[in-house]
Amino acid sequence: MFDILLQHPETADGGAGDRALAETLRRLGNVHLISLLEQQETELDRRKRHFRSAPLFRQAAAGEGFVWAWVDPDGIVRSFVLRDEQMELNSCALSMARLLSSEPIPLPRPDEEGRSRGLIAFAGRGGVVPALSALDFLEGRIPAGALTGKTVFLGVTAPILHDFHRTCHGLLAGTRLLSACTDTLAQHRLIRRHEGRGWRLMLVLLGFLAGAGLVRARPGHPWAALGAGILLGGFGWAIVLFAAGHALPPFPLLAGLLVAGLSSIALLRLVQLLSLQTLQAEAAAAGQVQRQLFPPPVWNSGEYTSFGCCQPCSAAGGDYFDVLPVGEEETVFLVNDVAGHGIGAAMVASMLKAAVTMQQDRESFSLGQAVDRLNTLLFRLFRGRKMVTGVFCRLEHRTHRVTVISAGHVASMIVRAGGTVEEIGKPGLPLGVRATTRVMPIETELLPGDTLVMYTDGVVEMVDRQGNPLGYPAWMNLLAARAPLVPDTATVGDLLEKVHAHAQGCEATDDVTLLLLHRKTASATLCRQFDGDGALPSVGCSHSTPNHLPLGGPCG
């Protein structure tokens, strides 16, 4: 293969030297010549010019074909033009490869302008094509027989002749580029390059469908699905390239995948945001209804007063407290904690309110039987899938005795007037876990100045930034420091402030509920106010907060 254009005017006589060269070409019968195709574009038309060797050499050579290294828009040569359908010409690499190969060489589909192009496999299967110097043969350093059975590309590689081309492997001489293209065809390593608008549109559509489908299939992990789609797309592109010999433009596929994937993620996040807002609105409405079920924070009756508040960690919580009169001489106090948060827990808490109210209206009220009936009701409804912890206290006003039943709840505390703090209540199973439950009541007496403190685990499990909970010792110290513990807005507010101070600014992860039952001292019991002409002096009196305080008071 002569990578040299032997040019003369078509009618010129090159003399004896040209005739001798032509005779040598004819005698050898295996020398192929190159020609050049030059395409010129103007504003009016597009023209092609064909530069060929002189007729004397064309007639003597075994074949002829054009050379056309295709330059991509970035100035790099990656492919070679194999055939021009408009001029019905083959490239010299195609002609030579067909002579060397025993199998037919299929051509890629021509583009809109009739050019068939294929990507060049620069790394040949037999290694790098060696470059030999003509002087090595002329001076005898390499015998002529060394070329037997070889395909020789005769050309120039001197950079001064400017026959160099920019490739993905750097600058390559035109002769080496021609040999790489011929080797690609002869070894059947031709890669068909698809760059038409139809292919790009199809790849964009494929990427769009893949991106949207992957995100939709894994809505819980959309970014992982999109990343997996990119990896799978690259893997498939490599299989099509190396196994099937088709070079598809990767950017339309990637663009479609990213646009569809990111759009789907944005739409998914929008739907999730709207759903969250709807859920928050429903939770706020449920919480508003739930707050209407709570009793007033302050209760007063003779020697006793109580103060209760609930501080949910979300719009609707699972904590519930209540104060229920039973007859004229008894009152029931209870604090319940439904497992979980949100609307579901609030609904269970509301159901408990209705169930407890029904128990209150019975003629012969028994605290143990009431707790047992609540357990049976919860187990029938939820079959052990929802549990409720709680503490139930029955106060007998005349005897000043309290009966406490704990159902899997945190231990209640009695803060004595002298400052000691005692735990009360035996541990038991939460309500709703089993069909039957064992009730273990504990009785004690409230002395003047004593306070029974009922609360939920959100108090002692309040954690700081390091994850350390408040704990029972610290909570008992807070209670003992305020003995005698008279429940009012200031006292309960101060307790909750200390509890939240332990969190160091972290948001609470559980509802916080307090219900304090206090027996007044003698001086407070005798304190009265009269309308009319006279009034009993109220020196030393501790007045309770009015009953019309809104729910939560200091918890708000």
Image (cartoon, helix red, strand yellow):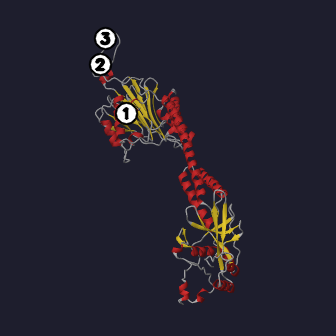
Q: Please state which amino acid type lies under the numbered disc 1.
A: Leu
Q: First in sequence: mark 1 or mark 3?
A: 1
Are there few (<14), some (14-19), or many (20+) residues within 10 Å of tag 1? many
Q: Nearer the viewer, mark 1 or mark 3?
A: 3
* Residue 218 location (% of width, % of height): 58, 51
Q: CA distance from mark 1 to mark 3?
A: 36 Å
Q: Which residue is mark 1?
A: 452
Q: Is residue 296 left or right of residue 419?
A: right
Residue type (three-letter) at the residue carrying disc 2: Ser
Q: Quadrant of residue 190?
A: bottom right
Q: Is residue 439 left or right of residue 124?
A: left
Secondary structure under tag 3 reads loop
Up the image or down, 399 lies above or below 210; here it is above
Residue 538 disc label? 2
Label 1 sits on a secondary structure element that is strand
Picture coordinates of residue 468 (x, y %)? 36, 47
Give the residue at mark 3: 534
